[in-house]
Image: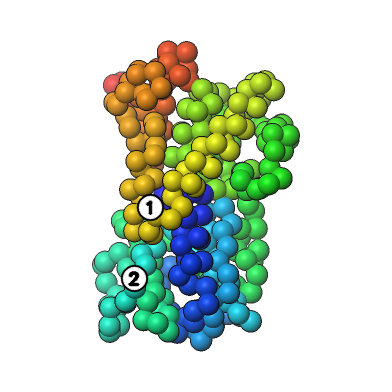
């Protein structure tokens, strides 16, 4: 799933390539992608893109005098930029293409989604706050006013594991499964640690890891073409998706905990005092 750093990089890329250009045609290929109907999708046609914004993991294309075209790429979605779009109308079918947007120059982008779970979403709204997922977002962790005191205040009163707190978009916007693993590894903290047990020193460590991990990922992604951002993300991850590999900090073997629809990775030496965490799915299989 694209998270804050990749969506920020897409925002920068689209700012360079979309702003100042007119959207002449928007073609929905998978109707499931459309989450709003008033104003209609065609309301962005014939309008110039004047700005591109990011709200957590949402991309927001603002048009001159008109609505905002907002998309969330979900788990398996992506944006593919094309300097020259294919001629002819795209055909609905079983392929990954969900929507195509064309500019007056002949360039444009495709929104695609792999797999069978169709969660990629497109909204056309007068105000981005009309999108429920944006309206409920917590603060952006890279905002200038997001300091250690802000993080401490957000975590005060929370009664859950820190991994889940970091992924809660209503608490902190933009962090998902991959970067929460990376942040907790950098903070030397167990993903199962209860937020209620965090000391001021641990909260400070978590804040530094949160800001540094996301800032470094954004810098790595900046200037990378849209089509290469997925590979760039994977190359920069230290623990997420690297089960069985050596930890780049201590050399211990990176372990995994699997859930029904996701998994997390961590280093026992760096994060859990050398103790492996119970893999619930594996435990059920062994019974």
Q: Is residue 218 above or below residue 59?
A: above
Q: Nearer the viewer, residue 240 or 11?
A: 11
Q: Is residue 215 above or below residue 43?
A: above
Residue plotted at (65% across, 48% down): 143
Q: Is residue 228 left or right of residue 47?
A: left
Image position, residue 17 (x, y; %): 45, 70
Residue plotted at (47% across, 43% down): 217
Image position, residue 33 (x, y; %): 43, 68
Residue 89 badge: none
Location of the C terminus by quadrant is: top left
The image's colour scheme reads rainbow
Q: Nearer the viewer, residue 70 or 164?
A: 70
Picture quadrant where residue 274 is located? top left
Mark 2: few/some/many CA within 10 Å (<14, 14-19, 20+): some
Label 1, on which residue?
229
Q: Is residue 201 left or right of residue 230?
A: right
The answer to whether one can see residue 187 in this image is yes
Q: Is residue 41 above or below residue 180?
A: below
Q: Is residue 178 left or right of residue 53?
A: left
What is the secondary structure assignment of the residue under circle 1? Answer: helix
- Separation of residues labelled 1 and 2 (CA atoms): 15 Å
Q: Going from the N terminus, do you reach mark 1 or mark 2 first?
A: 2
The residue furthest bottom is 46
Image position, residue 144 (x, y; %): 68, 46
Image position, residue 188 (x, y; %): 51, 22
Residue 82 badge: 2
């Amino acid at each position: 799933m694209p998270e804050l750093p990749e969506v920020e990089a897409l925002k920068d890329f689209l700012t360079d390539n979309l702003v100042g250009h007119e959207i002449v045609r928007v073609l929905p290929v998978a109707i499931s992608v459309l989450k709003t109907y008033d104003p209609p999708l065609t309301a962005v046609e014939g309008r110039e893109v004047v700005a591109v914004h990011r709200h957590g993991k949402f991309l927001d294309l603002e048009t001159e005098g008109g609505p905002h075209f907002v998309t969330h790429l979900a788990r398996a979605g992506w944006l593919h930029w094309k300097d020259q779009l294919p001629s002819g109308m795209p055909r609905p079918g079983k392929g990954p293409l969900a929507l195509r947007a064309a500019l007056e120059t002949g360039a444009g982008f495709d929104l695609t989604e792999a797999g069978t779970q169709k969660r990629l979403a497109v909204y056309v709204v007068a105000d981005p706050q009309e999108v429920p997922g944006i309206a409920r977002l917590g603060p952006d962790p890279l905002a200038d006013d997001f300091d250690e005191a802000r993080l401490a205040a957000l975590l005060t009163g929370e009664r859950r594991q820190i991994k889940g707190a970091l992924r809660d978009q209503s608490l902190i916007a933009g962090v998902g499964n991959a970067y929460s693993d990376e942040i907790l590894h950098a903070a030397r903290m167990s993903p199962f640690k209860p937020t209620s047990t965090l000391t001021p020193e641990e909260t400070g460590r978590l804040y530094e890891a949160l800001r540094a991990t996301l800032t470094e990922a954004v810098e790595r992604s900046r200037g990378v073409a849209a089509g290469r951002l997925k590979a760039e993300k994977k190359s920069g991850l230290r623990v997420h998706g690297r089960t069985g590999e050596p930890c780049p900090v201590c050399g211990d073997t990176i372990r995994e905990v699997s859930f029904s629809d996701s998994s997390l990775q961590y280093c026992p030496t760096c994060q859990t005092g050398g103790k492996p965490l119970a893999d619930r799915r594996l435990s059920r299989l062994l019974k």
